[in-house]
Structures are given as structure tokens and as C-alpha cells.
Image: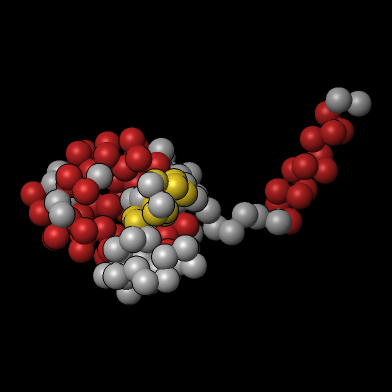
Amino acid sequence: AKMMSFVPLLLVGILFPAIQAKQFTKCELSQVLKDIDGYAGITLPEFTCTIFHISGYDTQTIVNNNGSTEYGLFQISNKYWCRDHQIPQSRNICDISCDKFLDDDLTDDMMCAKKILDSKGIDYW
């Protein structure tokens, strides 16, 4: 009878998948990020390692940090780079809603990460 308790949970997982959140593996992430390799002088392994330390490769990571909030895989801050309800007067340099960094489409995340690398370099992280 113990096995039966897993069946309903399994069905719920199949019928109601999460909002396309993704926990990447290192290999998957390397594939997605390969066009950032060498960008601003940062190697892919260095960038992958940095991302692991800040978000554990989980797109749904949200960290509150001294009155600002950082979103997603790249932990992009609502103070300068994206806009949310917490800081409506954000500079919003990437011209995007912060919650866009929580899904599994990394296209917009990477565009913003490149802007951050352009202006702050890897030291941002």
C-alpha cells in the first residue's frame, strides 16, 4: 500500500507542471551559455562556476539583499537592471520585468547579463 501514496503526487506533477522553472545541470547550462564564452574576457567555466555559486543553476532563485531583490539564474537586481513592484523607480537598464528572469528561457537573461558584463564585469557577481 506504500507505493499507492506516490501515484497521486506523480499525477499532480504531470498534470500541473511548474511555471517552466528549471534546475539546470552544469552540462545543460554550458550548452545554453556557450555563446557567452569569452564575452568580456570571461571564460565559460568561470561564468558557469559563478552562476552555480549565486543560484545553484536554479532559474527560480530569488534573493533579498539590503532592500533590493535579485532574480533568477544570474541574480539580476531590481535596483538597476529590471523592474518589479518593490522598486518602481528602478533604472531598469535591461528594460524588462524582473519576473522574466524566473522562467526557463534564458534569452532575455543572457542579454541582460551581457549588459551587466559590459558595464560592471564579472565583479558584479
Q: Measuring from the top left, give residue 98's x and y in whole percent.
A: 42, 64
- In this picture the colour scheme is secondary structure
- The picture quadrant where one finds residue 88 is bottom left
Q: Is residue 45 left or right of residue 96?
A: left
**Residue at point 37%, 61% (across, down):** 78
**Residue 71, visible in the rendered structure:** yes
**Residue at point 87%, 33% (across, down):** 4
**Residue at point 59%, 59% (across, down):** 19
The image quadrant where one finds the N terminus is: top right
**Residue at point 44%, 46% (across, down):** 63
Q: Measuring from the top left, give residue 39's x and y in whole percent.
A: 13, 55
Give 65 or 121, whichever is nearer the viewer. Answer: 65
Residue 116's place in the image compared with 5, above or below, is: below
Q: Is residue 7 left or right of residue 99?
A: right
Q: Measuring from the top left, give residue 21's x and y in whole percent.
A: 53, 53
Q: Measuring from the top left, give residue 69's x and y in whole percent.
A: 42, 53
The image quadrant where one finds the C terminus is: top left
Give 81 or 115, whichever is nearer the viewer. Answer: 81
Q: Is residue 11 left or right of residue 27?
A: right
